[in-house]
Amino acid sequence: MIDIKTEYAGLVLRNPLIVGSSGLTNNPSKLKEFEKAGAGAIVLKSLFEEQIEMQADSLMDQSDFPEAADYIRNYVKANQVNDYINLIKEAKKECSIPIIASINCYKADVWTDFARQIELAGADALELNVFFMETDLVYDCEKLLNTYVEIVRKVKDIISIPVIMKIGKSFSNIPALVETLRLNGADAVVLFNRYYQPDIDINNLQIVSGNVFSSHSDLSDTIRWTAIVSGKVPCMSIASSTGVHDWEDVIKCLLAGASAVQLCSALYTHGSEIISQILVCIEEWMHQAHFQTIDEFKGRLNYVNIPHPSMYERSQFMKYFSNRD
């Protein structure tokens, strides 16, 4: 009998399909729909540190009492936090699968108390979506790495549930970052978060929003780094994210070494029914390939398990085109 259970960040999931954090995961009834469709776990919509600060700043701009700044900022944060805690509690009432809370943050000392509240509210894990876009010409890159480390270390010091770091791909040495996060307590990483995509309207000469959703073409980097990281940091749990749109994409990520995958754009495009469709196809593929469990093929094509690891390296680009006119 085919068994599609997987272990991710210390959690046992009934299958590797995780509903990624988005506007779709902000409603308890919608969460129940995802569970019914077969999701293995759900990441709640992120609470954005930057958004809270912007809202507080907006209220302070309208205030005639500058000395009230701290009160306004704390008031806004408290209300946002309370709403999020209630979302976690409602989600746990509605769903029996793991519920993963999410914070989009960029400071090490802001969310430690909130992390404790998240654990007490019943979240099964906490995903920290850390995002920086530094443009300072004299910025110290080492300081950026230290901030990631400080965030995960401080949060791990006060909670016992798994802590997952969702990172971007704009690092010169992603495996080294993942290993550093592991050594400082991270239980898993998500490769990768998807940033806001800008575009230019040439007719109106304006900056506009680019494509919101990922595409199949985004999967290549996800596969590459999943394979390399799973090979070089074998004891770190990985969820592949960005560019995962169908069952074949899921299989590819698992073969590269992921323990789970996160779905987001595919759910916006096809609805929750895509989950059950993917699961049926995964089981059929496993049956045809004579695999009984995911562990039998997970990581089979990662960096250390293939004859030529350079297939995943950038130098392969020149080899690929060298014999083409």
Image (spheres, rainbow, N blue to C red):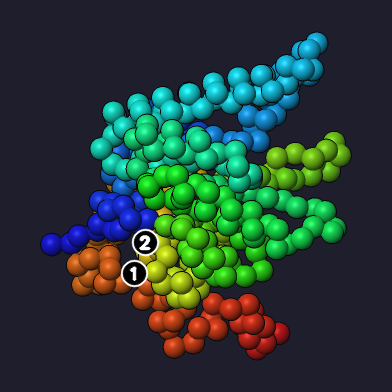
Amino acid carrying mark 1 in the image: Lys
Amino acid carrying mark 2 in the image: Ser
Q: Circle 2 — which element?
A: loop
Residue 147 versus residue 22: which sits nearer the camera? 147
Q: How many neighbours does mark 2 have within 10 angstroms: few (below 14), some (14-19), or many (20 or more)?
A: many
Tell me where residue 214 appears, x and y as whole percent. Answer: 56, 50
Q: Is residue 214 visible?
A: no
- Where the C terminus falls, by quadrant? bottom right
Q: Is residue 19 placed above or below 33 in the rendered structure?
A: below
Does the CB distance between marks 1 and 2 fall below 8 Å?
A: yes
Q: Is residue 289 placed above or below 263 in the rendered structure?
A: below
Residue at horizontal 65 percent and vertical 64 percent from the top = 171
Q: How many neighbours does mark 1 have within 10 angstroms: few (below 14), some (14-19), or many (20 or more)?
A: many
Sequence-wise, the earlier of marks 1 and 2 is: 2
Residue 264 versus residue 281: which sits nearer the camera? 264
Q: Circle 1 — which element?
A: loop
Which labelled disc corresponds to residue 298? 1
Residue at horizontal 48 percent and vertical 76 percent from the top = 232
Which labelled disc corresponds to residue 259? 2
Tell me where residue 291 appears, x and y as whole percent. Answer: 22, 70
Q: Residue furthest front?
A: 157
Residue 79 versus residue 120: which sits nearer the camera? 120
Tell me where residue 137 appears, x and y as whole percent. Answer: 85, 58
Residue at horizontal 48 percent and vertical 65 percent from the top = 183
